Amino acid sequence: MRTEATPSLEMERLFAAGLLFQRRVTEDQLRDVLTDRSNDGDHSLIDLMVDNRIVSEEDWQNFRDSLRRRILSDSGTPQSEATDIHKLLNLAVGKIVDQVTDFDVKAFLTEGKLPGNSEIGQHFDATVSYELIREFASGGLGSIWLVREDQIQRDLALKRMRPEVACHPELRRRFLREARITGELDHPNIVTVHVLGHQGNEPFYTMRLLKGRTLAEVIQDQPRTRKGIPRKLRDLNRLLSIFRDVCNAVAYAHSQSTIHRDLKPSNVMVGDYGEVSLLDWGLAKRLDEHEHVLPTSSVTEPSSLELTISGTIVGSPSHMSPEQASGQIELLGPAVDVYGLGAILYSILTGRDPHQRMGGESAESMISRIRNTPPPPPRKINPAAPPGLEAICLRAMAMRPSDRYPSVTALMEDIDLWLGDEPISVYRESFTKRVARWSVRRRWLSQFIGVFFVALAITAATLSTYYWVATNALVERELRELRDTTNYVSMSLQRNIDICVQDTRVVSEFPVLQFLIKARQKQDVKQQRQWTDLLASSLRNIVRVYEIYVEGLIVTREGENIVTLSTRVSGDDHPRIDVSPAKVADEEMERLRPAFTLPPDGVFVSRPYIESSVGMRDRRSSVVMDFLAAVREQDHPRPYGATALKVSFAKMVNWDDLGPQGPLSATVYIADETGHYLAHPDPLRSLGATNDGEGSLMQEEFPPLSPLFERGNDRDSIFIRPPESGDEVIYASKLHYAPGDHNRYFVIGMAMPYHEVLSAPVRNSRFIAPITLGATALLIVLGLVFAQTVARAAHRQ
């Protein structure tokens, strides 16, 4: 871009002041452009800012238009433009100059001087040469060399930019930005930058040479189990001391409005003499700077998860915060470093990274998991991790930034409290821990109270143990009888269901059906009538032999009735038969539809439902179940029709015969998977027995049985006793009646009075007193010895 007319110097100064005031440009960016402007007299400052993508041509045009409107509004004539620009410049510079810290930027805004044009602030050129000894590290932007400074003959570390990326403007800016940010941070735990220069087209900077190991190597040096978990946290205080130094460095950087954004153990160097340095500020950002995102892929496929992801996502996946994984780099603040410190503490406690790639997981999937799922708690990986430190770690690594520590200083305070054996803000100590503190301060009183409560507790335990053993023996015996009775009912119900399934399969495979199908295809009316009568007779025989059936039905796929047999009106002995080729009602065909999708030999068992029918003698008999099967023409895969046997649930259960079972006097309850009663001692509480057809729910009458009715709960049986179950002992279990459908089942419950179970233990209670007295005398002696031992141990701590 080239401006149509070269703007005046004052207009350039006014435009730059406005950008600084609006924080659309940083001092570093403006200084770089001023340097280029000083070396290149052919291009205006505006041209260079547009070329470097700091502003757009539209921004410059909008500024000019706004400025002209302001001048016309104030003076009413364009002839006074220069005077008005000068006034506006003084006003704008006055607002921003006190906030500007860079010398070159301040000189340009106040005096219009470009870098190199002012005598004040001139730099002495010092030639420093370095001898390259060896390369000992390599990264994405550059490599790190061990060098020797010729003049002083000291060893330094030199980081140089790779030749293949040095020509990339944005990568070059990032490299220089890393050197400047690191150099501006003057802290004992942040590596010192000595010189920033360039060799040809390759920029480099030198820094203090660090000798030692990374914190990651120190952590990995701990003894481990086969699963890679630290066998014990050896030298934990030493590791926490290193961690505190890292926290101090980050807290200082935050005080200078700088965030690191790539905290991890491999970026912490631990010297041989205890010195700690936080490295790699390549992804650091000043909070008052605008983020420049490189036009690269947001997620890469690194060979190692220790590599830093470039692009719209910044940071290392192994220690990345959820907001970094979301790619919203403009919204990253100090909370991202709080998370990073928590991730380092996580590695100290567990010996592993908080985010690890799973087998076969892509980088994109891993980033998505980091964004949505927190890592497992440290104690789940390493049970030896102290609970207090785990609480600190989890607070620092909270998914939402607002749920973390408000600052690094607050995190350090909890670490110091834990090291001082004091209560921390994010974890409530156990009762035993607090009692131990109190015992150390009040030694003799704690011994006396300890003896008293130990004796009392053991005495109560003796009573409870005997009572429990005696009671539990009888309860277990009664429970076995409850289970046996429940199994008897379940087997009886399952046997009836199996018979119905078998009968349905037999009806669908009647040989006479094949003859009837062929007669219908030939439209032979005489043969159809003959085979239909024979088919009706066969179906009637099945219904009469097994009286639980209330209806038998065979229809074609198109909905034409073949045979309908019903016992509702005429009774079981003389079922009503309908062989008229009438059209079956749509509601009936919808009920039969599952049969047309069944495989050969398949039988569909429906859920119990209410069928309102005229003439039923017992309203409970309105609860029925359907058993469906497909009718197929021989050697033809497509179903020709369907057969259905409708069963009365009341007759299938034989509820009238279910009274007290054996010596238990147990009461039987049966419900479907929704909890609606299908069988209840009170007939008016069963499904279909009320006016609204809903009845009562088992889980409402017996709330402890609710897990049996929860979708996804795999419990198949529940045993409950008072007081949870009132005055009864209840045992309930599931009966899955539909093959292949785990969500359709009956719940069969048995209840019996609890007083019958307790009769024997109550009669034997006279033996409890002498046992209690002897146990108390013995336990007082043992309690004295125990309390004295505990007090000595607490005093040693």
Image (cartoon, grey):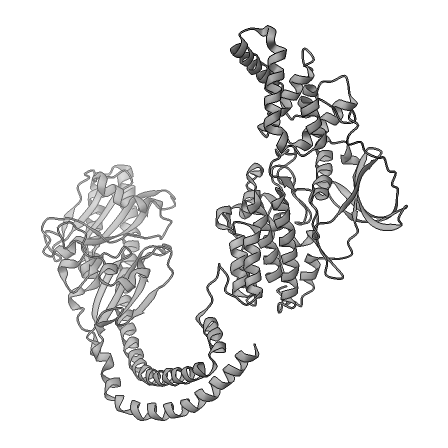
Task: Determine the residue positioned at 19% across, 47% down.
Answer: 564
Left or right relative to 303: residue 656:
left
- Nearer to the camera, 58 or 681: 58
**Left-right relation of 192 to 226:** right
Give residue 124's position: percent from left, percent from top.
Answer: 84, 35
Q: Where is residue 259 in the image (x, y as percent from the top left)?
A: 62, 44
Residue 182 appears in the picture as rendered: yes
Mark count: 0
In this picture, residue 470 sits left or right of residue 10: left
Location of the C terminus (image quadrant)? bottom right
- Decide: is 786 above or below 219: below
Quarter holding residue 478: bottom left
Q: Quadrant of residue 731?
A: bottom left
Vertical arrangement, residue 526 with respect to residue 268, above or below: above
Q: Identify which residue, 230 or 690, lies in the foreground.
A: 230
Residue 359 visible in rendering: no
Picture coordinates of residue 287, whole percent (x, y) = 60, 39
Vertical order, 31 against 309 (above or below) = above
Instruction: Give residue 538's position: percent from left, percent from top.
Output: 22, 54
**Quadrant of the drawing holding the N terminus:** top right
Q: Which corner quadrant of the image does residue 285 belong to? A: top right
